[in-house]
Image (cartoon, grey):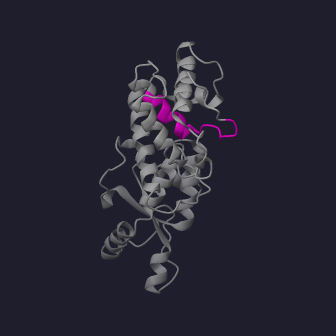
Amino acid sequence: MARTHGHGNPNWTRDETILALDLYFDLNGKIPSGSDERIKALSEVLRRFPYHAEASRKESFRNSDGVAFKLQNLRQVATGKGLGNVSETDRAVWLEFGASPDATKSLANLIRAGVAASQASEPVREDVEFVEGRVITELHTRREREPKLREQLLSSRHARNKLFCEMCGAPPPSANSALREAHFEVHHIVPLSSTSTGTRTTRLSDLALLCANCHRLLHRAIAVEKRWITVAEGKSVCGV
């Protein structure tokens, strides 16, 4: 097998390694060469990752041979056979998903959806990352910022006279209608990892209305605890 000549490329992230593991499962552990169309397809996805824009200009970045090598690394972790230079990320992802091909597939589909969504909009800059990974965090945040979704939820709360934060209970601080609405953000009650495709239809019952402060606190708690936290649980976890 040819060398990847990948010196200087960024380390594989958790998101990327999950995609590689998903392909490893699809291949039943039989690793083809870098000329295989499935290997090439994954290489193309990896080169479109939103936070690898500069590195992806290099021909060596996540090229087909490099993807095939990564699959060899995963086979080494899984079976003890294959290349020996496995990373801590390889081991951690295998420990988490090695016995769960279905969970791997579900998360991999979400990551692909996040990569696809990143092609149509500017990257989301957040200092909080969900346990699912950076790409899914960006997809989740884009959905929560969908203007029509927020408008519909605010209209529904207005009609029911329930314009308050569902976590801390605080009403809007201003009588000005524009400023009152600016106080609130939309939060998905159901985590994106619960869907296998990343293209779920969102209903208003899937959403919570939170003030900006509680929304950020809840996202931070999810990242710190490395698990999904409900709005009700967030009240005690975040001390509000």
Q: Quadrant of the rendered structure where residue 188 is?
A: bottom left
Is 211 rendered above or below residue 80? below
Q: Is residue 34 left or right of residue 154?
A: right
Front position in the image: 123 or 212: 123
Image spot of residue 100 (x, y percent): 43, 26
Residue at 40% in and 19% down:
28
Which portion, as a residue range, is magenta? 7-23
Q: Is residue 116 left or right of residue 6?
A: left
Q: Quadrant of the rendered structure where residue 3 is?
A: top right
Image spot of residue 31 (x, y percent): 47, 20
Image spot of residue 32 (x, y percent): 45, 22
Q: Is residue 54 magenta?
A: no
Quadrant of the drawing holding the C terminus: bottom right
Residue at 53% in and 55% down:
235
Instruction: Identify the residue at the far right of this view.
Output: 8
Residue at 59% in and 39% down:
13
Residue at 45% in and 50% down:
114
> So how many labels did they put on this image?
0
Instruction: Identify the residue at the far bottom of this view.
Output: 176
Q: Is residue 12 magenta?
A: yes
Image spot of residue 99 (x, y percent): 45, 22
Front position in the image: 188 or 101: 101
Quadrant of the drawing holding the N terminus: top right
